[in-house]
Image: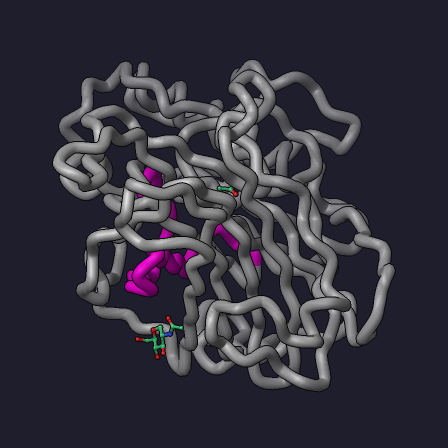
Amino acid sequence: MRHTTVMLPLLAGLALLPAAEPLPVPAGADHPRGYVALKTSVPPKIDGKLDDECWKAAPWSEEFVDIEGDKKPKPAHRTRMKMLWDDKALYIAAELTEPHVWATLTEHDSVIFQDPDFEVFIDPDGDSHDYAELELNAKNTTWDLLLTKPYKDGGRAINGWEIIGLKTGVHIDGTLNDPSDRDTGWTVEIAWPWVGLGELMADKKSAPPKDGDQWRINFSRVEWDFVVKNGKYEKLKKPEHNWVWSPQGVIDMHRPERWGYVQFSEKAAGPVAFVPDPRHPVKMLLHEIYYAQHAHHRKHGKYLPRVADLGVPKSALGTPEMEVSSFGFEAKLKSGKETWVIGADARIRNVGR
Ligand SMILES: *[C@@H]1O[C@H](CO)[C@@H](O)[C@H](O)[C@H]1NC(C)=O
Ligand SMILES: *[C@@H]1O[C@H](CO)[C@@H](O)[C@H](O)[C@H]1NC(C)=O
């Protein structure tokens, strides 16, 4: 999505930003959306048509909303997704209602969000680093990339990275690139094998997931305003619309801490209740400290050694310990039998007792 375009040139120049340029802080700390993926014994045929028997058991997600959340108007067209899994892969289906289906890009790994697209982001172990992004357009052209960490933390997009065994299919209910009629939309089907997802995890061993495991995931749809000229769709030079499953609170998908959760269930039929992540408040508190440290650093060129000086309201969860070094900082918070740590690069994880 746009952040990536803007970012590629901009990131390289991040160090040149004026010191006072604030890092936008996502609004809200509510628990992100959750979806329970049921296990299927028969995988879907990846042809873009969602007529497979197995999809009937999978409920549709909520309709996507604007990336900035409630303060923005409801998207003009409906988008929703569903997920299933088995021992081989995670299966994703999406339905994009669209009266004018168009796409131009045909080359794998082109910057797909220049066309209207559907995007998936996955951070299996939820540490905000080493996450994958997949974008595809209505021509079934794909762009898969690996992010070592979020762009805001100096992360790089590794374009040569390929999703092992990925299968995608697109079905158009209507006509492609024909403005003379109205279309119903397009549907997407994805098989994303566990082989390969394991390498995005610190322990490499948690894929395929076990019953009850939760991974961070998000979905986004990019839509461009257009005019029809000489019988063709022509994109307007205006910012794109970003419609997402779980709102980010900021126009940047690269905030994995705000993504939704997929919870894996061994059951073949629902309903199975989604269990909110009990660690979410601890993670949000550490991120609040992370954003406060960066705001201070951008103004004064240094991190603060005392949490009390950061202006973060006192929390019932406790006061994190702060360690500042010439490389950055670490904020650490004990929570029951776990100790959660966030670093200056937003990597967050449980380091045990
Ligand atoms: C989509 O693209 C993939 C990879 O190029 C191809 O194998 C598949 O047949 C295509 N299918 C559909 C239905 O678009
Ligand atoms: C990702 O998930 C979060 C949490 O639900 C949500 O707020 C955000 O909008 C989602 N972003 C996208 C692009 O889906």
Quarter of the image that includes the C terminus: bottom right
Q: Residue at x 56, y 16 (%)?
A: 71
Return the x and y of residue 248 as percentages of the image width and height: 52, 34
The vertical placement of 141 against 101, above or below, is below
Q: Residue at x 51, y 45 (%)?
A: 97
Specify whether 194 is left or right of 228.
right
Specify whether 144 is left or right of 91.
left
Q: Residue at x 40, y 21 (%)?
A: 295
Front in this rendered view, residue 143 or 296: 143
Specify whether 178 is left or right of 348.
left
**Magenta-span inclusion, residue 134:** yes
Return the x and y of residue 74 as percentages of the image width and height: 56, 25
**Magenta-span inclusion, residue 82:** no
Front in this rendered view, residue 56 or 240: 56
Specify whether 48 is left or right of 223.
right
Query: Where is residue 268, by image quadrant?
Result: bottom right
The vertical placement of 296 against 204, above or below, is above
The vertical placement of 126 against 151, above or below, is below
Return the x and y of residue 267 as percentages of the image width and height: 82, 74
User: Which residues are drawn in magenta?
Assistant: 126-153
Q: Residue at x 19, y 24 (%)?
A: 17
Residue 327 visible: no
Residue 246 visible: yes
Ligand 2 resides in the quarter of the picture at: top right
Return the x and y of residue 239 as percentages of the image width and height: 29, 26
Front in this rendered view, residue 339 or 2: 2
